[in-house]
Image (tube, grey):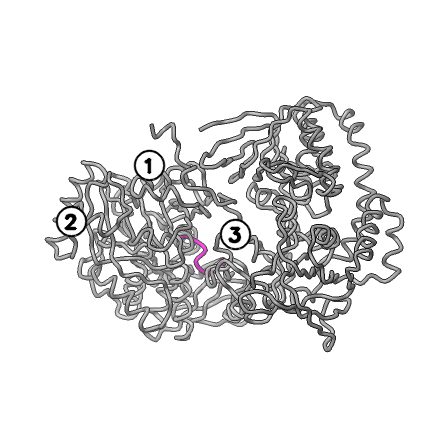
Amino acid sequence: MRTERVDLAIVGAGPAGLSAALEAKAAGAEVLVVDENDRPGGQIFRQPPRAFRIEDRAKLGRDHKRGRALLDAVTAAGIGIETNTAVWNIAPGHLACCSGETSWEIQSGAIVIATGAYDRPVPLPGWTLPGVFTSGGVQTLLKSQRVLAGRRVLLTGTGPLNLVLANQLAEAGADVVAVLELADPGLFELMPMLRGPWSLLSDGIGYVRQLRRRKIPLMRGWTLIEARGTGQVTSAVIGQVDRDWRLIKGTERTFDVDTICLGYGLVPSTELSRLIGCEHRYDIALGGWVPNHDLYRETSIANVFVAGDGSGVAGSLVAMEEGRVAGLRAAMRLGKISEPVFTEKSASSLQRLRRLGRFRAILDGLSAPRPGLFERMTDDTLICRCEEVSLGDCRQAVKEGAVSLMELKPRLRAGMGMCQARICGPTLIEVLGGLTGQAPEAIKPFSQRPPVKPIPLAALLDSEAAE
Amino acid sequence: MSEVTGFDVAVIGGGVIGTSIAYHAAKRGLSVGLFEKGPLASGASGASLGLRSIWVWSHLLPLESGLKNDQRFIDFAQETGEDIELDTSGRIIVANSEDDLGYMHEFVERLQKRGIEIRLLDQAEIRDVEPNLSPRVIGAAWSPIGGNAMPIKLTYALARAARRLGASIFTHTPVTGIDVAGGRAVGVRAGAKQYRAQWVVNAAGAWCAEIGQFAGVDVPVVPRKGQVMLLNAPPGFVRHGIASLHKPGPQQTGGTNIRPTPHGQIIVGGTSEYSGFDTTAREENARDIARRCVDLVPALAKLSVLRSWAGVRPRTSDGEFIISGAEQLDNFLVATGHDFVGVTHSLVTGELITEMMTEGKTSVPIDGFRLSRFTASKSGQAHGAA
């Protein structure tokens, strides 16, 4: 089996991972980055496949432009990136990687986990109909393949991604029916934003202005109630919600659509930080279970660092600063730089993080899931899509005495399918909490077991030993 | 102390063995309280492959009783209407070395002589019965006896059935003490409450030694870790439970097992190691399982591995069960040591323990499972890592 030995191994080539790599490398550490995707950049800086010829870069958008600078710097620094590589097991100083049908190992003095986040799955009636997507999925199709998921599109959920995506879809030629935003901030809530970082604020205002220019209605305080259709979504029932995001009866309206984007924020990918045994805490504003870390991104395990959305959803600007701090701190722990040098080099990032933190707290307050979000489900709405487990099934299991995920799983097979509980896990925590009267933080998430991503069995066969 | 309640039987342990005892005892009209420190099936029963062995692995269980194992599962499923993913399609055992083939001939002949339905397959039959078997598999035998059951569903089904018969099942309720008075176990303490009991049954699997200490009874059982892997598979990829047959050594293992599930998945395993109560799924074990199961079914290499997990089985020093009363405390019963054949012997164990309580003796002789065998010989000292 191939073994690579480096000072610092970084999981994830998104904004956090690449920023960490740049700083650590500059500080004199040997760095290796691994990423599942075909090209580095993560979701925010997702690039079209290598085989594509790009005629007009401007069409790829603003994120792409920002990402280009980071990617160019990484290339210039000569940082090694192993793409198409999944990390399937982790222990201090050890990563088990799988590329194609080959498993190999990285041994390192330190590890930065920068695994990002994925779309929060929010079950509601009709969400398994073809034509209903997550916003992140639709954006991936658009960014990487230049494919439009549909023609007549409704976006629903909360947070800035839907605003960005609506403009991107319109730009690419889709008919965007409306953007439904759960949060309905009063003026009072908006005031503190004026002290936020200008770039983020101008971004936000820019997205809203663009929507207005394109005559795409931004409906604040509205959300999707049900997706309808036979064999394919053909209409969307929407309604107005109160401050707790609960439906106000009698406000329902129907739109004809062929595509619905569900964008309810993100869930941190904590599979690796949990498998290695880092302490975690539940913070719904950050997306759910997140690893504990200090100001310098150090976890409860020595020489294991976390950065970016995987350690709490906060977006790419925050992720880059967190990555820088993690990379510098790792370099310091590896003995590449002294503590005073760390303090000096990390000062500006830490300061920016403090400023971004304030802005983020406001956004979190607006977009963090509220109780009504998990009340759209009816008893026959599927929560676990792999194994087809409904809310009604969960209700029955709780009636029979289930109080933990460990007891739902064997009864219902929830979480036993191909997605390894990524889709149903976050919802089940809320649902079980609601049905049993437990706080979500009292519910132990599904335990993580290797491989945390499906890998071909062939990868476990040691080809050298077999010869 | 809060109000004292009582049961005829206090069962400690909510795995396949404990819930089976609860079910069988309740069926015979005993009042039952079962205490489990975690959720049901959180030990070996939750990690098991769910194989039901063809033959009587235990040399000491009388054959006429062992042969009824299949019927016990069929009856349980029919009587209770519970879905335990019962598969009665029989088992295939395979040999892929000359040594093991020689042993297989001997083994099949021995079983046939005792009246067990099993026969050797020729090469054409092997490909016909299980097309994906490796050409390197040089011998195989098939028996209509045995098959699979989903061990977690079995545990829950037994608990539900017991509850319907009046049993109380306390999960997340660790036993913290056993009350002993006048040479008898008189009750258990669990979840800050006290429960009187006429019988106390220690069915805590690999944790039986710890529970035994509460009553001052030595139960020489150690945790033996086993790891398995779950593969995503198209239906029919593997049709039967397949097990490799090996010439038994001093540390008998479960060999290599491949079990299709009704959910388009295949479970493969297992391993055997002594590492305390650690249940970390290890890469080396995953590689070892992968190598061994691809030796039997090369096409498995094309499938995806979804998960790997481990559990600890209860292992005695001589590999035989303990189904017995304690010498110094004869209403304290112990049922453990089932190692890798717990699912197969779950129902019979429940029957035997219940017979001890209701008849004062078992319907078949099982002296070989007595706890006293460890104090009578030196072997009691020898348990532990090999």
Q: Nearer the viewer, mark 2 or mark 3?
A: 3
Separation of residues labelled 1 and 3 (CA atoms): 39 Å
Q: Is residue B258 left or right of residue A241?
A: left
Which residue type does callout 1 highlight?
Ala
According to the picture, the residue beneath numbered tag 3 turns out to be A419
Q: In this orientation, does residue A83 appear?
A: yes
According to the picture, the residue beneath numbered tag 2 turns out to be B120
According to the picture, the residue beneath numbered tag 1 turns out to be B386
Name the foreground residue: A390 vs A274.
Answer: A390
Q: Position of residue A108 (x, y in %)?
A: 57, 28
The residue sitting at 19% across, 43% down in the picture is B139
- Classified by dominant secondary structure, the portion drawn in magenta counts as loop
Q: In this orientation, does residue B175 appear?
A: no
Which residue type does callout 2 highlight?
Leu
Q: Nearer the viewer, mark 2 or mark 1?
A: 2
Same subunit under labels 1 and 3?
no
Q: Is residue B371 left or right of residue A303?
A: left
Mark 2 surroundings within 10 Å by alpha-carbon count, few (fewer than 14), some (14 through 19), many (20 or more)? some
Chain at tag 2: B
The residue sitting at the front extreme is A55
Instruction: Name the element at disc 2.
Output: strand
